[in-house]
Image: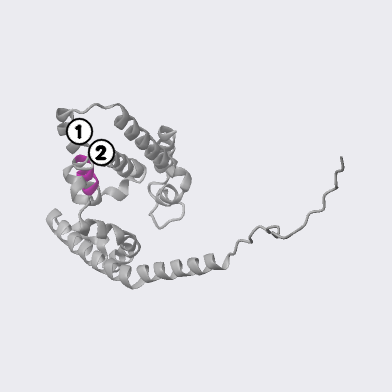
């Protein structure tokens, strides 16, 4: 099924690759926003969970194997993901977009599940990194408008060093804006919704089962011997 989804996405890309992402008929719109094309993502996630459970149940401790697999399943996919994020030419490959992102992500999740005390696992458990994870939703919401306002798509025209420097500054700026939005918008909204849900929960009353009075007399037929 995963192979079929990727094959259909590739075939679709061949006929609509020339259309810009702003075109509703472009490959980007259909492949990125169509839920059916993401079935392979969910399938790979389930496969990773099954592999993790199988490995935990069947693998015997091996220090040599752990020294090899720990960086291979954690550092390598993380480095590949960051490289793809910094690659200016990635919009030209929407057909393989899921394969480019999902396959390293699945390997990374599998590696962190197997080796939570690895170098990357300890890094991701730091309080500052956990906090950045909390503001990641706000980061996701504001990053595109900020990049559009700063015309970030033009940064790829210069040198590689200049491109990386400008993108690093934009990431810092977006992070600051996301943190502000997290405290001023997201957390108050969460508290408001939680309060409304608690109030609604108190309004829902469960009717108690009507108990029979203790002094109730039940008429029974008298039996005479």
Residue at 51% x, 69% y: name it. 199
Whole-percent x, y for residue 191 in the image: 40, 69
Question: x and y percent of residue 175 in the render?
Answer: 24, 64
Instruction: Pick whichever, 123 or 165, lies toward us.
Output: 123
| Residue at image mark 1 | 69
Please give the label number shown on residue 108: none
Q: Choose between 39 and 75: the one closer to the eye.
A: 75
Does the segment drawn in magenta span residue 24?
no
Looking at the image, what colour scheme do you see?
one colour
Which corner quadrant holds the N terminus? top left
Q: CA distance from mark 1 to mark 2?
A: 8 Å
Q: Residues within 10 Å of mark 2 (few under 14, many from 20)?
A: many
Q: Position of residue 42 (x, y in %)?
A: 41, 41
Q: Is residue 158 above or below residue 44?
A: below
Residue in view at x 21 percent, y 41 percent: 74
Outermost residue toward the front?
A: 225
Q: Are marks 1 and 2 in contact (CB under 8 Å)?
A: yes
User: Is residue 79 in the magenta section?
Assistant: yes
Circle 2 SS class: helix
Q: Which residues are magenta?
A: 76-82
Most extreme residue toward the right is: 224
Task: Give the dominant element type of the magenta stretch: helix, strand or loop.
Answer: helix
**Residue 84 left/right relative to 51:** left
């Amino acid at each position: 099924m995963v192979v079929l989804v990727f094959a259909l996405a590739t075939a679709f890309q061949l006929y609509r690759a020339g259309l810009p992402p702003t075109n509703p008929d472009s490959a980007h719109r259909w492949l990125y926003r169509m839920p059916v094309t993401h079935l392979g993502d969910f399938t790979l996630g389930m496969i990773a969970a099954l592999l993790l459970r199988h490995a935990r149940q069947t693998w015997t401790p091996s220090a040599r194997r752990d020294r090899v697999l720990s960086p291979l399943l954690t550092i390598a996919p993380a480095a590949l993901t960051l490289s793809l994020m910094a690659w200016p030419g990635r919009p030209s490959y929407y057909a393989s977009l899921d394969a480019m992102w999902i396959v390293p992500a699945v390997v990374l999740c599998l590696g962190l599940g197997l080796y939570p005390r690895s170098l990357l696992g300890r890094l991701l458990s730091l309080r500052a990194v956990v906090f950045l994870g909390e503001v990641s939703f706000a980061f996701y919401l504001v990053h595109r408008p900020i990049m559009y306002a700063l015309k970030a798509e033009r940064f790829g025209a210069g040198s590689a060093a200049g491109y990386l420097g400008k993108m690093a500054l934009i990431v810092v700026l977006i992070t600051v804006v996301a943190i502000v939005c997290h405290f001023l918008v997201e957390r108050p909204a969460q508290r408001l919704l939680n309060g409304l849900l608690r109030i609604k929960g108190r309004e829902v009353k469960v009717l108690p089962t009507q108990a029979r009075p203790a002094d109730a007399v039940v008429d029974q037929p008298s039996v005479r011997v």
